[in-house]
Amino acid sequence: MAAAALGSGTGGRPAKAAFVTQPPNVLIVVTDDQPRGTLSAMPATKHWLGPHGTRYPNAFVTTPLCCPSRSSILTGQYAHNHHVQDNTHPENLDVRSTMERYLQGDGYRTAIFGKYLNGPNLNLSPAYFSKYAIYLRSEDAYYNSRWNVNGDIRTIGEYGTTFVADKAMNFIQTNEKNDVRPWFLYLSTPAPHRPFVPEYKYRGFPFASMEPRPSMLETDKSDKPAYVQAASGSVDRAQKTRKKQLRTLLSVDDMMRRLHRHLVRLGEVDNTIVIFISDNGLSWSDHGLLGKRGPYTPSVMVPMLISYPPGLGQGTVDTRIVANIDLLPTVLQAAGISSDPRYPIDGRSLLDSSWSRDHILNEYQQEHGPTPTWAALRNDSYHYIEYYDETGAITFREYYDLVNDPFELVNLLGDGDPTNDPPNAAALSAQLVQDKQCSGSNCP
Ligand SMILES: [Ca+2]
Ligand SMILES: [Ca+2]
Ligand SMILES: [Ca+2]
C-alpha cells in the first residue's frame, strides 16, 4: 500500500498535490448513453455531487461509443492507444493498463457491477476485479437478463439498475465492516440505453417536453456529409426518446440516493472519490441523427461530476475542457499510485488545477451503421472534423464557428461560400494528423 502520493505523478506528467495520507475509496458510476442536460431528472445525484463536488460542464468522451469510451475511462488513453476502437474487439484492451489492475495491485478490494465491455462471451471474468456481476448488452439488461455473477451464469429477474445498486450496497457494507483496506467499485447501469425500459413504478412518469434546440430543427443540411443528409429523425421521436431515457434515470437516481446515505452512515463520504459520468452522449434528432457515434456536440459531450472533498472544490464548477481519459490519472493521484511507464497515460489529473487544454481530440472508427470513420479537433470556439475512406484519404471536412454557431448549423467548409472558409484549415488538418498519433504527454 502506498502511504503517500508519489511525486513522479502519472504517465510522465508532473503531479503537484501530495496530500494523500490514507488512500480513498473509489466509486465510479458510468451510465449508458446519457446525454447532457438530463441531470434535471436526478435530484438526489445533483444534491449530492453538486454541493459536495465539482461539476464539469465541458466534459467530453474521446470516442462516443460504449466500448472505446469505457476503455478510455479505465486506461486514461485515447482509443488509438488502447486499441478498443469499436464494440466488437474488447479483447484488444491490455488489462494490465487498467485502473482495476493499479488499484488491486495497491491493495484495494475491487468490484464491478453492471456493464464491463461489450463482448462475445459472458463466461469471461473481468481481470483484476475480485467481485463482479456483469452483463453484455444494456439492451438486454433491464429485466430478466443474463448475468455472470462471480463466474455463475444466472438469469436475474430484478430490474438491472436495482440489482446493481443492491450489489453495491452489499459490497460497501461488507468492506467497511473491516475497514483496513480501501475499495474500488465500478458501477455501470443499463440506463438510459435503449430500449429504455423503466422500472415498473416509473412507467408513464410525466415529463414535460423540451423546447427543441436549433440543431433539432436544422432544415438545410446541404452543408453536411451524406450520412447526415440521409438521417431523418424527427423532433417528435426525439421527445419520446428523451422522456423514456429520463424515466430510466429515475432508478439511477434512487441508486445514487441509497449510495450517498450509505456512505454518510458509514462515515466514508469524505474518504471516497465519487465519479459520475456517461460513456457517451446521444443525439436527439440533432441534424436528424438519433443515436451516438457522430462527431457533433450531443454525442461527444457528457454529464460529469466528481466529489472528493480532500482534493477537489465543493460546489464548484471546473470549466476546463476535460475528458474520460482524465479519470484514470485523477484516481491514481488521489490514491498515490504511480503509473506503469509501459502504458503512457494520455489524460491529466483533474486534482491538478495548473493545466488547461487548448483543444480535445475526438475519434471514431466505422464499425457498422452509416457513420464513416472520422476524427475531430475542438475547443470552445471551433470544431474541425475530417471523414476518411478505407485508405485514410479525407472524403469530407466540416468546420463550425462555435462562438457564432454553437448548434453546428453552418459548415463553413461545406456551405459553398469560399469567402468565409477558416484560414487555418490546413493547420488544423496537420494538427489532426499529429494528434491522431499522439501518446502520453504529447496528447491534447
Ligand atoms: Ca453507451
Ligand atoms: Ca446547415
Ligand atoms: Ca465556406
Image (spheres, rainbow, N blue to C red):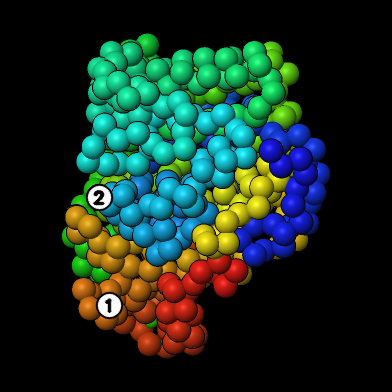
Question: Dot 2 corresponds to which residue?
Answer: 88
Q: How many angstroms separate mark 1 from mark 2 (CA)?
A: 21 Å
Relative height, residue 151 to residue 157 (above, below):
below
Q: Which residue shows up at 35% across the image and 47% down it?
A: 67
Q: Nearer the viewer, residue 198 or 241?
A: 198
User: In the image, 132: left or right of 109?
Assistant: left
| Residue 126 is at least partly visible in this image | yes
Q: Position of residue 279 (x, y in %)?
A: 43, 44
Q: Nearer the viewer, residue 320 or 222?
A: 320
Instruction: Confirm or reject: label 2 Cβ below 8 Å from ligand 1.
Output: no
Q: Name the element at disc 1.
A: loop
Residue 41, which numbered label?
none
Q: Position of residue 111 (x, y in %)?
A: 49, 29
Question: Dot 1 corresponds to which residue?
Answer: 392
Q: Nearer the viewer, mark 1 or mark 2?
A: 2
User: In the image, 112: left or right of 268?
Assistant: left
Q: Which residue shows up at 49% across the image and 52% down it?
A: 97
Q: Residues within 10 Å of mark 2 (few under 14, many from 20)?
A: some
User: In the image, 113: left or right of 105?
Assistant: left
Relative height, residue 74 to residue 440 (above, below):
above
